[in-house]
Amino acid sequence: MPKINTNPIVALQLPRPGQTLHQDRRALTYEFTITPKTTVKVLKETLASHGLAKSGNRSELIQRLSEFAAKDDEWIGAEINNVGFPSKHQSDEVQRVVRPLTDAESEHNDSWADTVLKSNERPRTHRVNLSDAATNSGSIVSEGNTPPLDPGSYAAITARRMEREVRRESEVWSKVLDKLHDIDAKIVNTLVSHASQSSGSSGRVEISVSEAADTSISDSAFPSAPSPPIQQPAAVPVASRPSQWDQPNSNLKMVILGNEEFTFDKTQVPDPPLRHFSKDISCLFREWEDSELLKVHGRPIPVKYWSVIYKKSAGAKAKAWAAMKKEWGNWKYLVDEKVRLGSEDAFWREYTSSDGTRFRYQQILNCLKNNRKHANAQDAATAQAYFNNNLGREDAQGVFAYSKSRSAKVCTKEAVIARKWRKFVPKGAALVTQEQNTLERQPWGPPSLTMFTPFPPQ
């Protein structure tokens, strides 16, 4: 025998979500029909749109909705959330009647907005809690002779909503300002420390902390800053600038960029720029010496110094550099080759095919890699021949030695031997020259210098 569905069809009159209900205004309603096909999810969404609890089984949900629909006197004073479009179970809703604001409501809104704007202009130590704008009785405060509005009125509800939005925005900007104050305080403290350390040198110029603090957001950010003027050198050469602060900061790092000392906060270094030069090698040659792709504390950092900056950075930035340092090394190979050939035009003459097509990025890198491998093999063989296949000899001065597991080792890889040999050549040539001066008077003549012909770096 087929099962008979005993669930009745229930039609309820419910207030439309999104309206404010009070005694002076007729509630706008819609009909919500509950059929056997109405799901529990739809029932819970309807309950939530009216601010009702949505726990329980289907029967409890229907019972709760029915009780709410029957007690229309309890709708007054309720603020119903607007959760979106009605479901397919809802009939056409009654159109809302748009009521224009009265003069009193407009004047009240203007007055309230002026109050909020004035409160935001005060220092952060005297911030106004916007939630106190309402009195204990719930009426909205107004200035002048404007009478307070009924807390259940449309204008009062609109004002409270605007107040909440402004308060949220105010809190966000408050956090931003606090962060700027902290950064500003660090800058001023750094200037004070630097000036204090340099106060004993000649050529002084007076600056005051109050002048340095003029760039801050507000004077209240530095309540304890000293006011007497501090002496600071007017023009200190780059080489004589102090490399450490009076109050050391573990985050401050100093590097040499060309002939300039540059001190920066290693935690404030941006991520490595997402720039590749495989399609434009000429752009690499330009950016290598003069680039604004990376800026640290507002100072442009040329591509050639990226490794110097990121080796001193901290945290995720150092890890990010580890992922791209191989690519930066390839860039350096290309630039070194251009420098070796003398110009960019000479570079492209060298790496252009017979039909006039320029080599691609990877083709050039492969050529350079083969050149380095050949040069390393040749220089390593030269070093072995000079020291009679004994790189640990005393006259090698330990150039080819290293320590591993507390025992002395001698280099065996061709690339390492070649690199160390190139460093040894000038030193060895000087020793041979000295020995030549000593042995010049001997009958067998001076020693040969052919082994110390300089090799260009590869």
Image: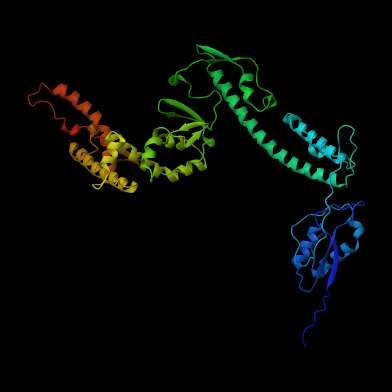
Q: Quadrant of the N terminus?
A: bottom right
Q: Is residue 453 above or below residue 358?
A: above
Residue 277: x and y, percent? 40, 43
Q: Quadrant of residue 402?
A: top left
Label count reads: 0
Q: Is residue 417 above or below residue 197?
A: below
Q: Quadrant of residue 229?
A: top right
Who is closer to the viewer here, 81 or 216?
81
Judge whether residue 172 can be spotted in this image.
Answer: yes
At 82% from the left and 76% from the top, the residue drawn is: 7
Residue 272: x and y, percent? 48, 41
Would residue 292 appear left or right of 113 to someone viewing this image? Answer: left
Residue 371: x and y, percent? 26, 43
Who is closer to the viewer here, 368 or 376?
368
Q: Is residue 6 above or below residue 317?
A: below
Would residue 397 appear left or right of 77 to someone viewing this image? Answer: left
Q: How is the image coloured?
A: rainbow
Q: Residue furthest left?
A: 443
Q: Is residue 189 above or below residue 310?
A: above
Residue 351: x and y, percent? 27, 43
Would residue 366 appear left or right of 275 to someone viewing this image? Answer: left
Would residue 390 appear left or right of 42 to someone viewing this image? Answer: left
Judge whether residue 399 can be spotted in this image.
Answer: no
